[in-house]
Image (cartoon, helix red, strand yellow):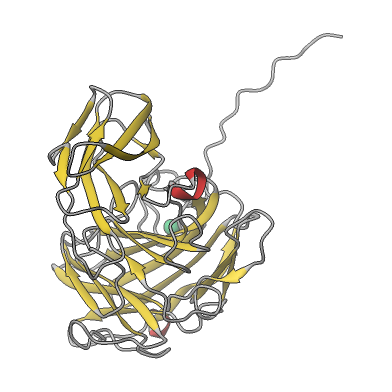
Amino acid sequence: MTKTASPPRSRRSTLCPFCRERLGEEGDCQTCGAARDLVPEPGPIKSQRIRLEHQACGRFGLRGRHTPTGDLIRLTYSSDGGTNNTRLRIGQRTPLLEELDSVLPVKVRRGALSGVWESGRLRVAQRVTLVGGPTTQVPDTLRVDYLVWNRGRGRRKVGLRAMVDTLIGSNDGVPFLVPGRQGLVHLSEDYLAPVPPYIQAIERPDPTDPGAIVHLTLRGGEATPPDRLVIDHWPGSQGSYEFFRGKGKSWGRDSAVGLYWDLELAPGEVRRCTYLYGLGGMSSLASGNARMSLTVPKVVAPGEPFFLAGRVFGAARGSRVRLEGPASLSSEDALEQVVEIDESAAFAFVGWDLSCSKSGKKSLRVVLLGPDDSEETTETVSVSVKKR
Ligand SMILES: [Zn+2]
């Protein structure tokens, strides 16, 4: 049998990877403004771990299972996203995304839920795809992209606000883990740039048995950090653009998060706003360590900033934590930190802004030292540093 050479493959898609409309011979997408190589080709939109459901208007919701064989539970209040909404701020108006004129109907097209809308010379595209979770590396996370395209002749200021009605299973008032905060966040909060790198909602406060963990990525990787993050009471399915009621208010049994991007667009400019929402991980799940739990993205690019977050349980006043890592690791923070003790909080938060210049699998070890310098516990996580 003779082997014939396979024909040269030119597999470059002629469809826009963002909105799935046909691309011309050259240049950016004429439907949504996406640059040809802006976004990777999507994979299948469902996995063992999560289910995306959507409404014809473009709202979407998520269910997931935090163990491979567990039950699918809701990770947004309505599994099809009916209680989430996205609004724009265009001049004095703050319309819902679905109230704009439809350019391309909402549809799952080859692995991406996408839709395109416009208001005058402003075009907005939404795209939802399934990706590996930053802290889990299994396909359990939605990547949510918005493109905002100024097709007019003047500069424009545009706001985009995504509101997610957070929930785990049947708990609509889930508490949040916010890097930098001692203890769980139970009351309304308003964060301006730089917003936290991520927030997690957890089913139970136990680090070795937290149940489902919802992970909202705001900074790092492909995320485009919002200018503001709000955690507050759910404002209703038609909730307004601004829904923050003031700091420290109770959200009772119904929490929601708001992500705000403030954009200023030159004529012809396209801007992308991206966040990730899905299941999350923490090191104590595998290690069973009840004294310390670490959370870190599993894959980063060389030189890319990333955040190592840790929670320390039951540390005495005067305790310290020490981070040990490879020589190629650089840190914006002191490698040894004094653990800040807040008696009223269930745990103390520690964290480091890091980057790593060399590729390879890197081990990061955090040691808890008691006031007498004795090693009380250690926890290790690994990060793969590789080019994207
Ligand atoms: Zn397009």
Nearest the eye: 23 or 66: 66
Q: Is residue 70 left or right of residue 324?
A: right
Identify the image quadrant of residue 346.
Answer: bottom left
Q: Is residue 228 above or below residue 294?
A: below
* Quadrant hosting residue 275: bottom left
The single residue placed furthest to the right in the displayed view is 1
In the foreground, 211 or 258: 211
- Quadrant location of the C terminus? top left
- Pick the front one: 3 or 184: 184
**Position in image of residue 142 (x %, y %):** 48, 59
The x and y percentages for residue 340 are 16, 56
- Count the marks: how many? 0
- Which residue is at a point 36% across and 47% down the rendered structure image? 294
Q: Say which residue appears at 54% left-offset and 80% top-offset.
A: 78
- Residue 334 lies, with reference to residue 386, above or below; the image says below
Q: Residue furthest front?
A: 372
- Going by the picture, which residue comes out furthest to the top? 2
State the residue in front, 105 or 72. Answer: 72
Image quarter where ligand 1 lies: bottom left
Q: Assign the N terminus to one quadrant of the image.
A: top right
Q: Position of residue 341 (x, y in %)?
A: 18, 59
Residue 57, how many percent across, how many down? Answer: 50, 80
Q: Measured along the vertical axis of the image, is residue 55 above or below residue 304? A: below
